[in-house]
Amino acid sequence: MSAVASPAVRIVRAACPHDCPDTCAMRVTVEGDKIVRVQGDPEHPPTHGALCTKVSRYAERVDHPERVLTPLKRVGPKGAGQFQPVGWDEALDDIAKKLAEIAARHPEAVLPYSYAGTMGLVQGEGMAARFFHRLGASLLNRTICAAAGGEALQMTYGGKVGMHLEHFAESQLIVIWGSNSIASNLHFWTFAQAAKRNGAKLIAIDPRKTETAEKCHQHIALMPGTDGALALGVMHELIANDWLDHDYLERHVEGWPALRERALQWAPERVAAECGITADEVRGLARDYGTTRPAAIRLNYGMQRVRGGGNAVRLIALLPCLTGAWRHRAGGMLLSASGWNKAVKNTAALERPDLLGGRRPRTINMSTIGDDLLRESSPAFGPKIEAVVVYNSNPVAVAPESPKVTAGFRREDLFTVVLEHFLTDTADHADYVLPATTQLEHWDAHTSYGHTYVLLNEPAVAPRGQAKSNSEIFRLLAARMGFTEPCFADSDEAMARAAFDDSVDREQLRRHGWFKLPLPEAPFAEGGFPTPSGRAIAQAPGVPLPDHVPNYESRVTAPALAARYPLAMISPPARHFLNSTFVNVKSLRDIEAEPIVEIHPDDAAARQLSDGQVVKVFNDRGLYHCTLRVNQRARPGVVNGLGVWWRKLGRNGTNVNELTHQQLTDLGEAPAFYDCLVEVAAL
Ligand SMILES: Nc1nc2c(c(=O)[nH]1)N[C@H]1C(S)=C(S)[C@@H](COP(=O)(O)OP(=O)(O)OC[C@H]3O[C@@H](n4cnc5c(=O)[nH]c(N)nc54)[C@H](O)[C@@H]3O)O[C@H]1N2
Ligand SMILES: Nc1nc2c(c(=O)[nH]1)N[C@H]1C(S)=C(S)[C@@H](COP(=O)(O)OP(=O)(O)OC[C@H]3O[C@@H](n4cnc5c(=O)[nH]c(N)nc54)[C@H](O)[C@@H]3O)O[C@H]1N2
Ligand SMILES: [Mo]
């Protein structure tokens, strides 16, 4: 018997592509074309050698038996998910023909729909943006996640900037405000744990007693959408006790006198009544915040998914200016670091907005896709949407008010193309599904919204089946549409290598897979915010003072509605899914077991409901079937419907977005997923 040499074992440097603040550096062990292991890079400080449960099992997702591996063409009724395999040429020729026909009448009748299924700069809005710009398609306002908080940071600090992740380890107080770090920002939690070992106090502010809240020293379980009031109450106490850094306020903040007046209207008792907590909790939080140095706030996007989310972020983001917490590198706040990273991205070169020429297409808000797919042509709206090309997103599952989203995608006269790894709820509604490569099969370059490193992703294995990268698919479509600009010939690798400007050391990026941006340690110790004046803004000409803005749906603002639907529902992520990604990975779905809603024992008793029972959660918009968990994770008056299940893997084809609405936040035109009244009853 002759010895067969085993294929060489290689280690490839990669980046986790998922929509998570952690953006881990990965090392993929490959033998031939087989993925042997996916691990965290021990040398990348934020990753620290560890991956989350989801991504450490990445091979299961890449080599999943249900991967879409050939182009598919619809054979059944719209939305039925019945397809037959077709060749690439047939699929691309037909798609290009249909898009060209529609575009010849109204280019804006074509809509790209994408979000952050991959956060890569190449496979995200790289070649795709070039394609749609050249076509003159409608623009998409990508608001579904971070727009309220993003706009708030822009108004307050001139960009999405904040503390370095690593410096939280040196904080003496960490307020985790509207974030379940253990579930959705695990690598931040590692630094918070280090701080805890050094004697720091950890406080969680969250309606739900999450796994993170349980591990903090204190948990303040306020009602959803009342964070702005709590921040004003903290300010009230900082003023009353003179725990203020007057010098910092005077030199580095615009509009402080007006904000001071407003905060003085929010005594702890008023705040307590608004937030559903005690006045002592408000006073205690203010004392801790006002008297501990250095004090850091890890704000996250969870708390801005309500009507007043933007104003609440503005108020919380200003707290470090009152106490001068920014003076220390372990003080201040972090909601998003993407402003630091954006500065080094060659966005215009990647996305080529110049290909629009003089055209200014209308913009569709991705968060109102339910309504917009159902609109007719009108002077105000423009042409009816006739074609949607979906990539890196699963709107039928994740967009608010899914009864309308589904009705829109079921339109017989809508031409839908979905680039996907799997037959998701959205792919089921496609006319064509095109098989896309995963991160282990393509090139990409990454920034992060939770740390200040950029990363490079090299392909570890060959594309599975007939899969092609998003960029390659748009390149091939561009050729068929007759787009001859040289940028449509750029390779994925060339785009990945050209993604960053010269402040990124390309050699270090290539060798290590990551590069830390050279930024000041304590960026705002002496003010110098990226606003026009360099000062933080509480109020300025054209920028009104922030205020507490109550929910659309609450006992106070909508009493008649609250009489019928008395429970506030939030729908934060389940730990083992990432939005709707991974719901079809069986080992992860087995951990989450089934779609659930958590309810407090008192609320369950009042409805004669018991743990483990199958219930319907409902309001005027829809009906969600799931299993009831009666426990103390829910506070009285609030139910937690953990998201985001694929509808077809949930009960009766429903998921939690049956219940959410399409009204938008105060800033940024984002969805208010967690501003939602419901009732729960036995099925
Ligand atoms: N495992 C996992 N990780 C993820 C995701 C995932 O789906 N699963 N999603 C990723 C994405 S897309 C994002 S944007 C980030 C999100 O990151 P985070 O914003 O940190 O997300 P969550 O873990 O949902 O934390 C939000 C928390 O806010 C709480 N909350 C809800 N309403 C309110 C409120 O009105 N006030 C306050 N104070 N708290 C409130 C919820 O109970 C929840 O615990 O996480 C990313 N990471
Ligand atoms: N009720 C409720 N709804 C929510 C939320 C909530 O907390 N509650 N969270 C919201 C938030 S924060 C967000 S960010 C959105 C997220 O919404 P989406 O961005 O739509 O995220 P996912 O559901 O993860 O879907 C991403 C899809 O992209 C696909 N994908 C991944 N990589 C690639 C690739 O390289 N190529 C192609 N073609 N496809 C790829 C994946 O297979 C997956 O199906 O959901 C929002 N919806
Ligand atoms: Mo998100």
Image (cartoon, rainbow, N blue to C red):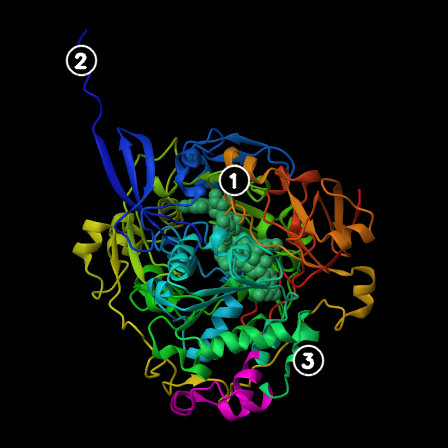
Give the label, 3 or 2, closer to the camera: 3
Looking at the picture, how far across and down is residue 520, in whole percent?
A: 27, 73
Is 74 on the left-hand or right-hand side of 335?
A: right
Please rate how many residues cluster around mark 3, counting C-alpha atoms within 10 Å: few if below 14, some from 14 to 19, many from 20.
some
Looking at the picture, how far across and down is residue 43, in whole percent?
A: 25, 50
Count of numbered marks? 3
Image vertical order of residue 435 relative to residue 471, above or below = above
Q: What residue type is labelled 1?
A: Tyr
Looking at the picture, how far across and down is residue 303, in whole percent?
A: 56, 65
Give the label, 1 or 3, closer to the camera: 3
Contact between labelled residues 3 and 1, with CB atoms less than 8 Å apart: no
Q: Is mark 1 on a helix, strand or loop?
A: strand
* Residue picked out by circle 3: 270
* Residue picked out by circle 2: 3
Q: What residue type is labelled 3?
A: Arg
Looking at the picture, how far across and down is residue 91, in whole percent?
A: 46, 38
Residue behind label 2 places its C-beta within 8 angstroms of ligand 2: no
Q: What element carries label 3?
A: helix
Quarter of the picture containing the C terminus is: top right
Magenta residues, start to end: 234-262
Q: Which residue is drawn at 83% across and 67% down?
A: 560
Question: Tag on residue 432?
Answer: 1
Residue behind label 1 places its C-beta within 8 angstroms of ligand 2: no
* Residue 37 position by quadrant: top left
Give the label, 2 or 1, closer to the camera: 2
